[in-house]
Amino acid sequence: MMTKAKIFGISIVAILACVALAVWQLKPIQHVSSASSDREFTLECDFAKFKQIMVRKNATKAVVAHGGLSLLRESVDDITLDTSKDDRPLLNAIRGTSKTELSATKTLTVRLDDPHIKNTDLTLRQVADVDTDRMHVETASIGEQQSIKRYATTLTAMPDGSRTRVQLSIEMKIEVSVPKLFVGRADSEVQRSADDAIAEQQQAITSFVIENADKKFIFPNL
């Protein structure tokens, strides 16, 4: 039969174990939260006009501004034009029927406005390939940058009859300092950031295209 002293001793041990477990659960740890999101939508704009708008009007700033980011600097590192499929590149460009293929690489510096990310500035590399029937743009962080282990977005657009079909995706890996007990909440918050960012990108692209779709000629921004 257990004595009161033994029962008291066991109770103390149990309480201390619970306290130790609670302290362990509440001690901050470094955790990498991963999130991804994607969506597809169509725009009432033919693909030829869509390409002109996105390339000539330089949609980068407008799209970035609606993705929880603001564009600080933008530089073109490389650009290649292939006119081999276009017998009248200048005339067709004016008409909006260009068959010229374009590849370009840019370096972007952006500022983030996200409470879940410690970094304020982020350097990205953007690679764009524009063909007669497809546009593909990949934008990704250059290596790991402080708490941002990876930040990448893709945009793919293609003809869909008289409309344009657009596919967007985003991937984020963010290191956070959080108690082990709240790791799941941190993952949910980063996922919410990814979902919000891609929704804002869709809104930005849609508004940007609608703003320019009715213009007869799409002139480059100077």
Image (spheres, rainbow, N blue to C red):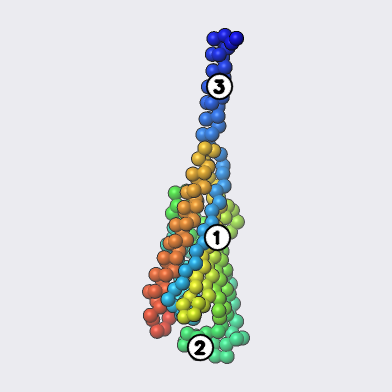
Residue at 46%, 59% (x, y): give it: 197
Eye-nearest disc, 3 or 2: 3
Secondary element type, mark 3: helix
As displayed, is residue 160 above or below residue 170?
A: below
CA neighbours of label 2 inside 10 A, class few (<14), some (14 to 19), many (20+): some
Question: Which quadrant would the N terminus be assigned to in this image?
Answer: top right
As displayed, is residue 203 above or below residue 189?
A: below
Q: Position of residue 109 (x, y in %)?
A: 50, 61
Q: Which mark is residue 48?
A: none
Depth check, front residue: 218 or 162: 162
Q: How many marks?
A: 3
Q: Earlier in the sequence, mark 3 or mark 2?
A: 3
Q: CA distance from mark 2 to mark 1?
A: 34 Å
Q: Which mark is residue 14?
A: 3
Q: Position of residue 134 (x, y in %)?
A: 55, 76
Residue at 60%, 86% (x, y): give it: 85
Q: Which residue is mark 2?
A: 92
As displayed, is residue 13 above or below residue 54?
A: above
Q: Which residue is mark 1?
A: 152
Q: Position of residue 208 (x, y in %)?
A: 41, 71
Q: Amino acid at mark 2?
A: Asn
Question: Which quadrant would the C terminus be assigned to in this image?
Answer: bottom left
Q: CA distance from mark 3 to mark 2?
A: 81 Å
Residue at 50%, 90% (x, y): give it: 91
As displayed, is residue 122 above or below residue 63?
A: above
Secondary element type, mark 1: strand
Q: Amino acid at mark 3?
A: Ala
* Residue furthest to the front: 1
Quarter of the image for residue 140 reads bottom right
